[in-house]
Image: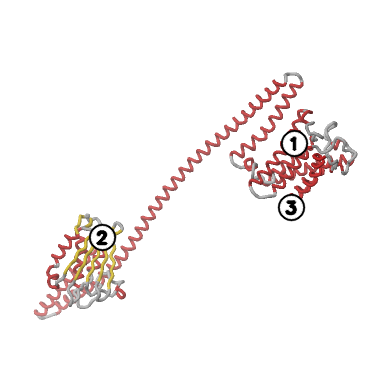
Amino acid sequence: MFPKIFQTLSKYLCFGVILIAGIALCGWVLDLSVFKSVLKGYISMNPLTAALFILFAGGMLSSHKNRYSTAIKTAIAIITFGILSLKISDLVFFTNFKPDAFLFTSNLKGNQMAVATVVNFVLIAVALYFSTKRGLRVIALSQLMSLLALSVSSIYICAYLFNLNSIIGVSVITPMAIHTAVCFILLGALVLFIHPRQGFMKTITSESVGGIVTRKTLPLIILIPFVIGYLSLTGQRKGLYNSEFSMAIFVVITSLLCAVIMWQYGKMINVIHRVWKSTESDLNSSIAETKNLNHEIETKNNVLTYTAVDLEGKIRQLEEFNKIVAHNLRGPAGSIQMLINMVLESDSDQEKLDFLALLKESSKDLIDTLTELVAIMEVRLNTQIPFDDCSFAEIISKVEHMLKGEMISKKASIVMNLKMPGLKYPKVYLESIFYNMISNALKYSKKDEQPFIEISSELTDNKTRLTFKDNGIGIDLARHSNQLFKLHQTFHQGYDSKGIGLFMTKNQIETFGGSISIKSEPGRGSEFTIIL
């Protein structure tokens, strides 16, 4: 928004300078006093001054949206410096070389370029040159030069407004004309508008509260001293009061009006502040609510993820149990049905007795299978079993007693390396885990070598690590790793095994968040690692 406004204003300022300077220059060409000066008796604008104004404004106008904008501005500054250097050398060294007398030598009596005009042109030229450079400090310096030129011009505007001849005559050689001062103010504003979003102008053009207040108060603060000063000075000249009272009127009324302005905008800022605080409070509440909602969503997502994983696991279990039921119950059930038919069809009492004996065995197999399935289901479903203080040494001793006969017959030995003496765990499960590990080590021992079982425990990453190492026949993991912990999977011929021990052990461990892994080679034993 603001860049476009300042571009439009810059065009109008250029046209204004060209118009004022052009009229003055025409006055010199046509020798018309009314064109040279604003009013009769006022100082005329120097023709060189008018030409430089047209050079500045015309160059700035042509540089608008021009890819050679920087080159044009630099050229204007250099040309101005070149001309002014001749004028400065005349003023300082009295060379009697007057560049402003080239065209109108005979008519310049009392209308030579004023020192203040030279100073202002130097300031504006420097400001224009720096405006072509990059960097915040350089741009700020450019705007500072423009503000200095504006200040010098404002002094003369004020002098003409208050009719202060003593100030007007301060210009050593020639006082500055009023329309010259006006053109300098327009040029100073023109240079300020080159970078409206940087330097000192950044505060004025800001869209924040500070920028709004500055834009509204700055014109009033500039105009009020002029108006009050003019009115108080007019009253003094009419003899209504002396100069001291005039100064008092100026100070008091100016201070009062500035205080009223600040009070008014203070109220506005307070309203904005209240709205801002209310908005900030609402925003903080919204942020807190959003965080809570995000936390709830994250929690629910975690629950859903856990539930989904749990459901997937249960679905896999159900599929596996369906296969188990279909496989394990179909055989005994089919056998029972067949034997019943054979009993019904047989005419021999002895055959019936034989068939009934077989029927009894098939019924027992069916009951055993159902018992196994129930035990497996209980392991997976019973997660509310209380945790007990378990001693590894006591459990190992109990298992040794339970397997005493087999250990004696095989001359087996158990070595304990218990860095962790025990832990809190469901005792019935821990006893079952130790029983299955030790009984498997005995069952799958080498026939020509005494079984040796090493049991160790230690604390690793705040978890209990159990290791069961044996010197048995081992397992070919390259072939059987995927079936190792599944139900009814056996990997050795000639051993009395139903393939249920490792399956139950794994389920008992994983029920409470543990894990089991194995290292094994055929003929070199096995090492089971359990993390609880």
Work out whether mark 3 precedes mark 1 in sequence or the reverse, and give the earlier one.
3
In depth, the one of 412 and 262 nearer the eye is 412
Image disc number at residue 71: 3
Residue at image mark 2: 458
What is the CA distance from the residue labelled 3 to the residue labelled 2? 82 Å
Q: Residues within 10 Å of mark 1 (few under 14, many from 20)?
A: many
Tag 2: amino acid? Glu
Mark 3 near mark 2, Cβ–Cβ under 8 Å?
no
Q: Evaluate if marks 3 and 1 touch, with contact meaning CB atoms under 8 Å apart.
A: no
Percent coordinates x, y for residue 462 in the rendering: 29, 56
Using the rendered view, name the quadrant where residue 250 is placed: top right
Q: Quadrant of the C terminus?
A: bottom left
Q: Residues within 10 Å of mark 2 (few under 14, many from 20)?
A: some
In the picture of the structure, the residue carrying the numbered disc 1 is 153
Residue 36 placement (x, y as % from top left): 85, 37
- In the image, residue 459 lies at what x, y percent? 27, 58
Rendered location of residue 256, percent (x, y): 63, 26
